[in-house]
Image: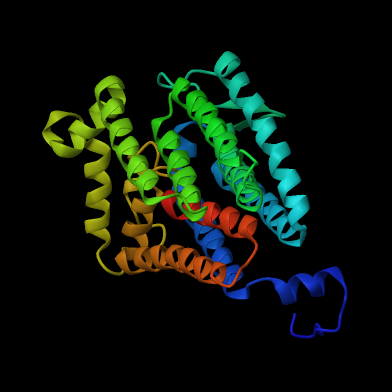
Amino acid sequence: MSLLSRADESLVARWWWTVDRWLLVAVIFLLGAGLVLTFGASTPVAERLGLPVFYFAKRQLVFLALGLVLMIAVSLASVKMVRRGAIALFALCLVLMVVTLLFGPDYNGATRWVNVAGFTLQPAEFLKPAFAVVSAWLFAGAMDDKSFPGRQIASGLFVLCAGLLILQPDIGQTILLGSVWSIQMILAGLPLLWIGGLLVLGIVTVFLCYVFVPHVTERFDRFLDPSSGDTYQVDTALNAFRAGGLFGRGPGEGAVKKVLPDAHTDYIFAVAGEEFGALVCLIIVGVFAVIVMRGLVRLTEEEDPFIVLAAGGLLSLFGLQA
């Protein structure tokens, strides 16, 4: 890539000289770390389910390749193309969310997945970034034209999305989407009184979820009083971190992946802690933090309100999920 000249007008050259290479390296590091951990953590799970040993790892590799292509394509796209693409994706995700509620399989009392072209997808995962970009466009429009009801439309879309998520039910995704929406409202210049109102609304929402949603109640009670329920998976994960110590037991030497059913997904960080140690886990967390902080610093140099709001929402989503 160093052979590319700044005078080169080719697509590859323009991409290379405009992309933030520090962010690119950080993202590639996380992708590589995720792939390595998936290869190590998923093999015992695949064997227990009677699947080929590298079933999950190969799927991860396929989606990683698709993700890289999508990442490069989006980074090459114009602002107008990104906005139009997000609107189309958002509309598609809304349709898929309804289809999921009507025809999706029920897993442990939740309907969150749908089969599309042979792949099992969770539409909410695609809805969140699309919503961040669409709402940024609406907020930015309201900032440019005071008569444009962008805030009201964005708020209405959030209520619609939140309603569909609650029906699944998926309270975690609802709170995450609400956090992104709130952060964008603040970035768009929301008055302090409204910010206080959002905080109160968030607290009330969490309280209502605790009172009326059984699995949320169970999780809160278990967190506050571990003896109130089954904490086997959490205890096993914590023991894995203790066993790994600072430098880990070594790649492939972990035991937690052989006993936890979700070692390749929800508890993959415990696998990392046991096999590679707390030091590597801290490095991974640090890379996540670097991506968010560097992205926010870059936004201080940006003047386009749409870019600030869209990137701010996406960075918030990325950081909160991490």
Residue 80 position (above or below residue 104): below
> Which residue extends farthest right?
9
Q: Residue at x 27, y 52 (%)?
A: 240
Can the viewer see residue 321? yes
Q: Position of residue 5 (x, y in %)?
A: 82, 85
- From the viewer's side, name the closer residue of 11 and 68: 11
Q: At 50% across and 50% down in the image, what residue appears?
A: 184
Instruction: Decide if residue 81 is on the left or right side of residue 10.
Output: left
Rendering coords of residue 305 (x, y %): 61, 58
Q: Is residue 245 above or below residue 50?
A: below
Percent x, y of residue 204:
29, 32
Residue 256 position within the rendered picture, expressed as x and y whole percent measured from the top left = 32, 47
Quadrant including the N terminus: bottom right
Residue name at image x 70 percent, y 39 percent: 87
Task: Kindly give the residue lying farthest to the top in the view shown.
Answer: 102
Count the numbered circles shown: 0
Residue placed most toward the observer, 286 or 89: 89
Can you tell which quarter of the image residue 93 is in? top right
Q: How is the image coloured?
A: rainbow
- In depth, the one of 36 and 149 nearer the eye is 149
Location of residue 253 by image quarter: bottom left
Q: State whether residue 122 appears in this view.
A: no
**304 lies left or right of 51:** right
